[in-house]
Structure formats: C-alpha cells, structure tokens
Image (spheres, rainbow, N blue to C red):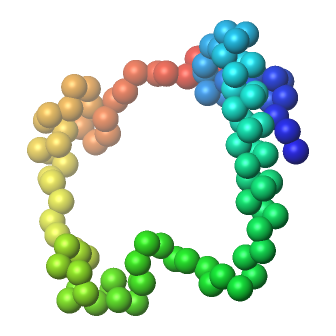
Amino acid sequence: MSVSEQDVERVAELANLELTGSEKSAMVRDLNSLLDYFAQLNELDTASIPPMTGGSNLAEAADSSFDPHLRKDEVAPSLRRETVMSSAPDTDGTFFRVPKVIER
C-alpha cells in the first residue's frame, strides 16, 4: 500500500489546505515512510505478547487507593446556561453562533 500525490491532493482538499508542489512531494514521501514503518511493525511476531489496555492496570486504577493522583468520577453541577451564554460573543440564547468556515 502506498500514498500517491492524488491521495495527498484529495486529503488536502478535504482539509481545506493549499499545498505547494514541494509540500505535496514531501507529504507523499513522509506518509509512505510511515506506511513502510507500519509494514515493518506488522512483520513482528506478537502472538505471545498480551494486549495492553493502557499505561496502567485498569483493575488497579479503578481502586482510588491505588494512585493518589486519580480522583473519583463523581457527578458535579455544571455551569448554568445563562452564565455561559452571557459570556459568549454571539448567541441566540440557547446555542453559540460561530462564523461559517466551510464554503461548500
């Protein structure tokens, strides 16, 4: 699998980016380099390695006494809509109004 310049142009179009010819070439090179690296990683035998769920043992992390930096997930009151909307630059009273950024 490899990335072509047409692939980069399509993604740039979707992201509303304007790339120069040299930027497109560099992007094709860099993305293909990443794909080559991923292909190398896929060649590794990981059958005997247990899957990870994160950087810590989730069972231990669920116990709040395990790490003093973890806090309990508790429901707390949120800000009142009126307070938030009064600070907004533009609102209809219920939602924020933002400028249109997509031309299509």
Query: Could you say where residue 75 lies in the image, as x and y percent from the top left?
Result: 21, 74
Query: Could you say where residue 52 lies in the image, as x and y percent from the top left?
Result: 55, 77
Query: Could you say where residue 13 lies in the image, as x and y percent from the top left?
Result: 69, 22
| Vertical side of 22 occupied by 93: above or below | below
> Which residue is depicted at the point 77% across and 68% down?
44
Quadrant housing residue 1: top right
Quadrant housing residue 102: top right
Q: Is residue 77 left or right of residue 42?
A: left
Query: Could you say where residue 28 lies in the image, as x and y percent from the top left?
Result: 76, 27
> Which residue is depicted at the point 25% across and 87% down?
66
Q: How many marks?
A: 0
> Which residue is depicted at the point 61% across and 27% down?
15
Q: Nearer the viewer, residue 74 or 84?
A: 74
Q: Nearer the viewer, residue 14 or 46?
A: 46
> Which residue is depicted at the point 80% across and 29% down?
7
Quadrant housing residue 2: top right
Q: Is residue 68 visible?
A: yes
| Vertical side of 53 occupied by 99: above or below | above
Q: Quadrant of the C terminus?
A: top right
| Vertical side of 76 occupied by 50: above or below | below
